Structures are given as structure tokens and as C-alpha cells.
Amino acid sequence: MLASVTMVITYFLFQTPEYPRDCHEVLNQCSSTNAKSGVYLIKPDQYPEPFQTYCDHNTTSGGWTVIQRRVDGSIGFNRTWDEYKNGIGFLGSEFLIGNEKLSHLINQKRYQLRIELENYAGQSYNLTYDNFRIADEWGNYSITSLGVVEGITDLPITWCSSNKDNYDNTCERTCENPNDCVIPDPADPERCLCPENHMILGNSCIPQEQCGCYVQGEGLVLAEGESYINSDCSLRITCNSNVLTSESYSCSADATCEERNDVRRCYCNEWFEGDGLTCTRSGPIDCSDLYAANRRNNGKYTIYPAESSGFEVYCEMSSGGWTILQRRTGSSVNFYRNWNEYKNGFGIPTGDHWIGNDKIYSLTKQPNINYQLIEKTNTEGSTYHSRYSSFRISNEGDKYRLSLSDYNGNAGNNAMGANSGIDLVRTIKTMMDRVPSTAQKNIEVAGGIQMIVIRALPATATHSATA
């Protein structure tokens, strides 16, 4: 139980040539003090110098050397080895005298150990052991003797075993499940726990190195079925039936060895999916895919529609990720071509070009994706556009038959829509034939399609204008 305690500490000095070795000798040397409790200097045998300690001369016949006091929680006792060795806290409040001082103190003669306790209900208990002794630091300050206990025999406390400590509720783990904390009982605010770097195995508390699936050099224990990957992803260690097994591990050429969310393994690179050992390309399937991945610069990109080995296109990102199927701005590229040339494409993506019917088919045949198409026409210096919210073409066997619907624009004559159901090559040539002479077809843009672009519609399509 934590209590508010006010203490008045009295300090006493000695004028004798030798310091008392403990508080019992203080009592014998200082009868003139009327056996007042307080802080005194003592010097146990073989201890290099005298030190202060608190002597209790009020309990029973007095002469008790107080080695620990906990009353109000003002001092934390979850400390390191060296702190317990040298002592913690303040003699005027909560403190521990220190294991090194204690080992010198109680190994010079026979001592009793008196323990006074108060529970959360305010009930007090005490018990006394008649032969208390601990080892030195070489023996880890372990208790070597307690002797016979005197006092209350039905004391309502549970002693922690020598390999456990008593802490406030904290995280305790098991060898079988090292990643999760054992859930404490809310009704038991303090309990015996395995110390740091120890784990529960059955009813025992053991150093984590003794767990069956402890990874040497890494300071971790694997759960059943869990794996550890080394720093360069060349080795995988797995816990199987409480035994570690090792196997070679190698990332795919399309993967990277890195740590994500505290898990190191092979991760497939962007636009690939898989387990890191095997990665399959998953995109980008078009310019809208790239735009969704925060690519914002207009320019040439490589896309990978389904069942395609990839090809270059020009992406117009400034207006939202449009894939350009055709650009015709001058006379540098002849657009009056044969079937195979329209099939395979001509020109270059950064200049005047036709992307190619096979490529357009690979784009528009992808399931669950609906493309909208815009044709931009320049006539005598004026720009017009026709937008179709649904656009597809069939394969070569069906002569790349054009499918368009839902026209919207300012071109007025719905030119391409009128050719829906006709093959795409004939449609383009028909629109080129609006220009009267072959020479004019190759020289002038007026009257023909200047640009054709497509973009995948989002799940809920909105027909926003593009430049």
C-alpha cells in the first residue's frame, strides 16, 4: 500500500577511534542518545570506507539496520544490476542500501532478517528469519540462507522464485509466443515476473537464449512458423516445432531486400506483385495508372497492359493522365499508310505518331476498365473536341472494329461516333479523306484529327474537360 509519510531524520557522529560495524553496535556505543532512530555511519569488516545507513532503535529491542524501505512509490525499484549493487534512493524516504554493502554487512556475523509488510487494505504483517546470508557479487548476491521463520505463518503473500522479480504489471513473454505480452490479471496489480531478457517455458522462467527458437547474434526468439531473414536477404531461418531450420534465400531481380514495419525480407518493386522471391509485373497498364502513382510530368513512359511485354507511349499528365494514341501537328509524318503500318504503329511517341492498333487493342481489351476517348480537331486555327465516355476496339481478326458511345463535345458532327462498328483504319482514313488532295493530306493538319487520347474511367466517372 502506498502511503503519505513525513519523516524527521536525525544524523549522529562518533568520537570513538573505530566505527560500529552495524546498527546493533551503534546501539551499544551510543547509550547517551537514548537509542534514537536515525542515520549513522557504520563500517562493516573488509568494507573499504564507512557509509551512512538508517538505524531503527524503536522496533522490539532496537539495533536494526534498515536495508530497504518502500512506503510511497516515490522511488522506482525497477533498476539495473549496478544500481542494485551500489544502492538507490535516499535514507530519508525510500531506498535500498545496496547489495555490495549488504554482502559485507551480513557476512561478518549471524544476522536476523525482519520483514514488515502492509497490504492494500492497510493490514500490517511481519516475519523474522533467524539466519540471513547472501553471496558476494561473484555469487550474484543470491540468498544463501534464511534460517527458520518466526512470526505469522499464514502470511497472505506469495514469494517470487529466485529467477523471477516482483514488478508492477509489465510485458512478460513466452518462448512459444515471444511477440505478445502475457495478459496480466487486473485483480493482481503486482505479481512475479520473468526479468528482462528472460521468457516463460512451461512453469519455468529461463534466459531467452535457452528457448528452442532463439536466433544467435540477433537477440530474438521466433514464434512457431515465424521466419527471420538476415541483413542481405541471403538466408532464411524458420522456427518449426521449436527447432530452427535454415535455408538459402534470394530476392527476385524485380525485388529489393529491405525492412518494412520492422520486417526484413524481399519486397517486389513498384508495379510488381508477389512474395519477393517471385515477382510478376502488374503495371503500369496506362498513363492514368502512372498518374495515380503521382507521376506528374508530361512525357514518354513505358506501360504494360495485360498480356503485353510493354511499349512506349506519350502521357499527358498535366490534364490528368491521358494516353496519347495519335498526335498530328505537321507534315513530318505521313499518315496515309497501309494496314500493317496502322497495325504496328508509326512515328515516335514524342512527335507525330500513331501508336498502333495492336497496342490500342491491348489497352481497351483489359477487363473491368472502361476508356473514354477525346479527338481534338484543328480547323482553320480553331480547336474542337469530341469526347466519348466508352471506347473499345476489337482484335485484328475482327478488323479492329470500333466501339464508341456517349458523345459529348463541340465538334458538332460526331465524326468518329458515326463510324462506330466500322474498322478503325477505315475510320481514320475516312476522316483524313476530308482533305481533298494527297499532297494536302501530308502537308496540312486542317480538317483532320490532330490528337486522340484515352483515359481509364474511375469507378464513378466524371466527364471533366481536358486541354
Image (cartoon, rainbow, N blue to C red):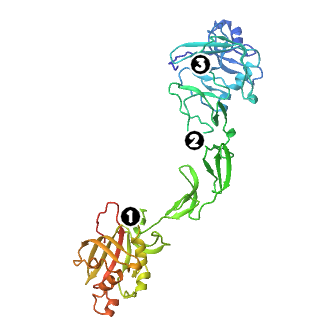
Q: Residues under labels 2 and 3: Cα distance?
A: 30 Å
Instruction: Return the mark for residue 229.
Output: none
| Within-10-Å neighbours for mark 2: few <14, some 14–19, many 20+ | some
- How far across and how far down the image is residue 267, in percent? 55, 58
Give the residue drawn at x 52%, y 20%: 2
* Label 2: which secondary element: loop
* Label 3: which secondary element: loop
| Residue located beneath label 3 in the image | 157
Q: Earlier in the sequence, mark 2 or mark 3?
A: 3
Amino acid type, label 1? Asn
| Residue located beneath label 1 in the image | 368
- How far across and how far down the image is residue 402, in percent? 33, 77
Instruction: Return the mark for residue 179.
Output: 2
- How far across and how far down the image is residue 344, in percent? 44, 81
Q: Nearer the viewer, residue 312 or 389?
A: 389
Q: Nearer the viewer, residue 240 or 167?
A: 240
Quarter where residue 41 is shown: top right
Give the residue drawn at x 65%, y 50%: 237
Amino acid type, label 2? Asn
- Indicate left or right for 8 with 449 as reference: right
